[in-house]
Amino acid sequence: MTPDQRFSRWVRIALAAFAVLFVYFLVADSFMPMTPEARVMRPVTQIAPELGAPVQAVLVNDHQRVAAGEVLFRLEPAPFELARQQALLNREQAEQENARLRAELAAARASLVSAQATLEERSGERRRAEALLGRQGISRQQYDQQVAAEHTAQAAVTSARAQIDSLEVQLGEEGEANLRLRQANNALARAELDLERTQVRAREAGVVANLQLQPGDYVPAGQPVIALVADRAEIVADFREKSLRHVNVGDEAQVVFDALPGHIAKGRVTALEAGVREGQLAADGQLTSIPTSDRWVRDAQRMRLHIALDDPLTTALASLPPSGARATVQLWPGQHALAAPFAWLQAHLVSWLHYVY
């Protein structure tokens, strides 16, 4: 075989290999998509006190693992303890005020009984005087005095009833349903809650990160002072949008972490995001801004999906991977039988490459 013939043969082989690889990548991009643009995402909670006060003590260290409910730091409790004591005094005052009103109400009811008895007596005297007046037994002046006395007694009864109504309104419901007691109890519960909030706790298990807080620092209410990286993690992967046309929630995924060369973790697609920021229009009163480009072939839009691992990584790592750790994700949409060996090969090839890169 001449050199020209050998060269021609290698050209044909190269062209055939290129054609085969081109077709393979076209098929693989649809039925076995892979992306190196994946990360471990662990929720980061910004720990902020609900009260503003100086820090009394910091009970954790930077990078320390904490359990859910564990106290991270304490605020100076003195002013909140005083507020609690004041709330207790206010409740005691409310109870005394209710006792005073009950006593006044009892006295007002007794006064009503007395006024009613006086009214009955005056009414009887007026009726007798009326009978005597008809027989000319008393003067008109004496009769008018009896009528006036009856009216005075009637006014006393009305006044006593009004006093009772006023005291009943002031006293309100009896027992714990009493408005004054409910207000005092509410203030006391708020003071006790504030006192409890001086101990700032972790809402979930995780690792303390970027701890700069020191005893004596004043922290305002709602100001984040500690970052807590949660133990739970998920994988977010960015694929070209055309690669996801056959992908559905529940499809199998293989994840290769940069930190774990040779190890392939299995997972499932849990969600596909509804869009990206470029797909959101702001209602700002401005006309539409159309992006321009002088490129003939624009970059493909990437879309994000979420993957949950079937098994925790603690068996492969001494600890959970840090938030933001890089990974490569191999999907297997529909679990087609013909795609299975190729997806397996691609994932293992990447895991081997991570040993040297």
Image: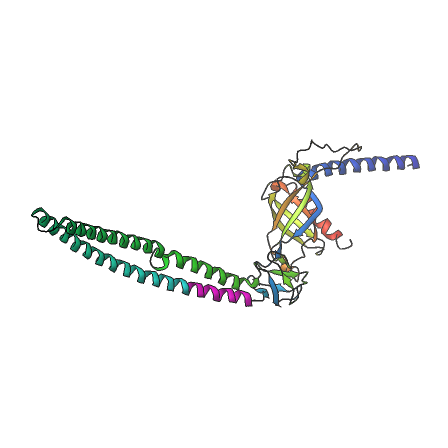
Residue placed furthest toward the left: 135
Q: Name which residue lies at 12% across and 48% down.
A: 130
Is residue 336 among the parts visible in the rendering?
no
Residue 55 coordinates in the image, percent (x, y) = 62, 65
Q: Main secondary structure of the magenta part?
A: helix
Residue at the spot 19% in from the left edge and 56% down from the top edge: 118
The answer to if 357 sits in the magenta stretch is no
Image quarter (top left, top right, bottom left or bottom right) of the N terminus: top right
Query: Is 343 located above or below residue 99 in the figure?
Result: above
Q: Is residue 69 left or right of residue 186?
A: right
Could one spot residue 14 in this view of the protein?
Answer: yes
Q: Which residue is pictured at 16% across the width and 50% down the height?
A: 141
Among the 4 quarters of the image, the one containing residue 42: bottom right
Bounds of the magenta segment = 78-91
Q: Please give the count of numbered marks on the rendered protein.
A: 0
Q: Is residue 86 magenta?
A: yes
- Looking at this view, is 110 or 25 the one in front? 110
